[in-house]
Amino acid sequence: MTTMTSMTSDELILSLEDMVEKAMSFPWGKSVVDTEKFENCIKQLRESLPIEIRKAKEIVTNRTQILEDARKNADIMLSVAEEKKKRIIAESEIVRAAQEKAAEILDHAKTRERDIRNTTNAYVEDLLKQVDETLVTAINDVRKSRNNYKNAANKVENKKSNKA
């Protein structure tokens, strides 16, 4: 079986549900779970969620870095293109041909920058969407587990009070 420290939040939630389902029941309506294991599982769950949140923040940070690198590369390409354009104009007798070539290089650099930015934005948006869906699912699972646990405890209490 997987150790608690290496379990994902989904696995931890399943482990909590399993503990509740396998709890020893008494005739008077109470159930007993291993509180140490249960509390350890809750602790691990609390620790795993900040890790997933930190991963989401890292994705956002990486997105910024990727965009900044793309801008720097595009700026370098634009700078190189501008210098090449000036040199061609200064050295060439065919000024118009040099201007057209430089403009083409600039357009290519701008197009490449735009393509890189669009691709990066789409990639980061997809990753953030996946993280968002994972976190929403985890939160919903925790809430469902809490409700299931409360309902099970209430049923046990009701049975106890009906017998009394």
Image (cartoon, grey):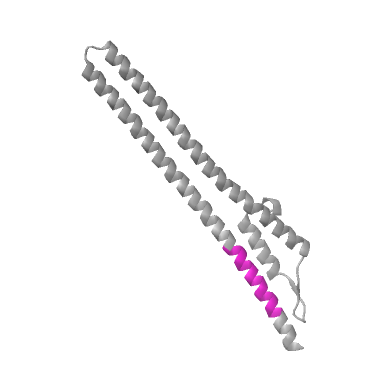
Question: Is 22 or 29 nearer to us in this picture?
Answer: 29
Q: How many marks?
A: 0
Percent of width and height locating residue 31 = 75, 74
| Image: 59 above or below 77 | below
**Residue 8 drawn above or below residue 58:** below
The answer to whether residue 151 is above or below residue 121 is below
What residue is at 65 percent from the left and 52 percent from the top? 48
Can residue 46 be seen in the rendering of this structure?
A: yes
Say which of 41 and 139 sits in front: 139
Asked whether residue 3 appears in the rendered view, the answer is no
- Position of 57 with respect to 77 (left or right) is right
Q: Is residue 66 left or right of residue 94?
A: right
- Quadrant of residue 154 in the image? bottom right
Q: Position of residue 137 (x, y in %)?
A: 55, 60
Residue at image x 37%, y 38%? 115
Q: Which quadrant of the figure contains the C terminus?
A: bottom right
Residue 19 x/y as whole percent: 70, 66
Report x, y in % for residue 109.
35, 29
- State the residue at coordinates (40%, 30%): 74
Q: Which residues are magenta?
A: 140-156
Return the residue nearer the eye: 136 or 79: 79
In which quadrant of the rendered view does residue 9 lie?
bottom right
Magenta span: chief secondary structure = helix
145 to 92, vertically: above or below? below
Q: Residue at x 69, y 69 (%)?
A: 20
Does 148 appear in magenta? yes
